[in-house]
Amino acid sequence: MKKVVTIAGSDSSGGAGIQADIKTMMAHGVFAMSAITALTAQNTTGVYDVLEATPEFVGEQIDCIFNDIRPDAVKIGMVSNIGIIEKIAEKLKEHQAENIVVDPVMVSTSGCALMSPDAQETLVTKLLPLADIITPNIPEAECLCGFEIKSTEDMVRAARMIGENLKGGVLIKGGHLTETADDLLYVNGECIWYRGERVDNPNTHGTGCTLSSAIASNLALGYDMKTSVKNAKEYITGALKDGLDLGKGSGPLNHAYRITGK
Ligand SMILES: Nc1ncnc2c1ncn2[C@@H]1O[C@H](COP(=O)(O)OP(=O)(O)O)[C@@H](O)[C@H]1O
Ligand SMILES: Cc1ncc(COP(=O)(O)OP(=O)(O)O)c(N)n1
């Protein structure tokens, strides 16, 4: 069986973070493991509190995983401070981790900062260079490229600028543009569009976590990067289309839609 670890924060309501990642990995038939970077008190209406793990404890979790059940892929989500980012980078190098997917989570859609502003530079210099693929949404890509993204042309320009200093691919997710849900992958100087059907569903909590976990699962299963993104895009569209409607705010997707056969 293929194994995947998520290094991310917990979402108490199960729509994003570690919980979304594990459900997504299970839906892909891979064995899921976790190194928890923070606990959040969160639900479909917002993030109410955050309790960070120490960098040392994050490192111990990663050691325990790699020294015993070595993962075939790694997904990284919420990493809230400089110490945690540096420790993760150190451990990924030490264990020579493969198939690293970094979702550079900065701010939740509900507006809560999930990374301290002073940690962004460390993310860029220490963690992103280790990634095989990074998956920023539009606001995150704007932070990384330094200009506003208002159109698909801007997405191309941003992906090239972000990607030119990285060894891995850059997938800019288009969910925050209004008409479509097209994502752009820039890899090895090539731009590839993944055209998405825009689903009329207000329940989009955790889409980014789910997509990056689906990509990591596909990479662990042995698919190449372009196929992994294509398969992950089909999965997220299906999970959104399932129409699960839970909670008082922007609810979660049905990560298990394939398993339940719906
Ligand atoms: N309403 C929607 N219909 C279809 N796909 C969507 C919709 N909203 C987001 N997506 C897709 O979900 C994935 C996550 O995108 P996005 O919402 O931009 O990320 P994040 O959750 O990190 O903000 C992308 O593949 C995006 O195209
Ligand atoms: C613990 C935790 N991690 C990440 C997020 C952000 O989730 P994401 O899928 O990027 O997007 P939204 O759910 O904010 O739309 C989170 N909320 N909590």
Image (cartoon, rainbow, N blue to C red):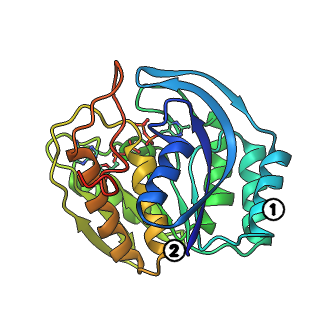
* Residue 144 in the image, given as x and y percentages of width and height: 49, 50
Q: Which of the 4 image quadrants contains residue 102?
A: bottom right
Is the CB of mark 2 within 8 Å of ligand 1?
Answer: no
Is 140 located above or below residue 164 in the figure? above
Q: Secondary structure at mark 2?
A: helix
Quadrant (top left, top right, bottom left, bottom right) of the N terminus? bottom right
Tag 1: amino acid: Asp
Numbered disc 1: secondary structure: helix
At x 59%, y 43%, the residue is 78
The three-letter code of the residue at mark 2 reads Ala
Q: Closest to the observer: 185 or 208? A: 208
Asked whether, in this view, residue 219 is left or right of residue 254, the answer is right
Percent position of residue 38, x then y: 68, 37
Q: Quadrant of residue 61?
A: bottom right
Estimate the spatial distance between the alpha carbons at disc 2 and disc 1, rounded to whole Å.
19 Å
Q: Could you tell me which residue is drawn at 33 percent across and 41 percent down?
A: 253
Residue that numbered label 1 is attached to: 63
Q: Residue at x 53, y 49 (%)?
A: 104
Q: Rate crowding at label 1 as few (under 14), some (14 to 19) or many (20 or more) other CA atoms within 10 Å.
A: some
- The spot of residue 118 in percent (x, y) is 67, 37
Q: Residues within 10 Å of mark 2 (few under 14, many from 20)?
A: many
- Residue drawn at (47%, 58%) of the image: 26
Q: Is residue 94 visible?
A: yes
Which residue corresponds to mark 2?
220
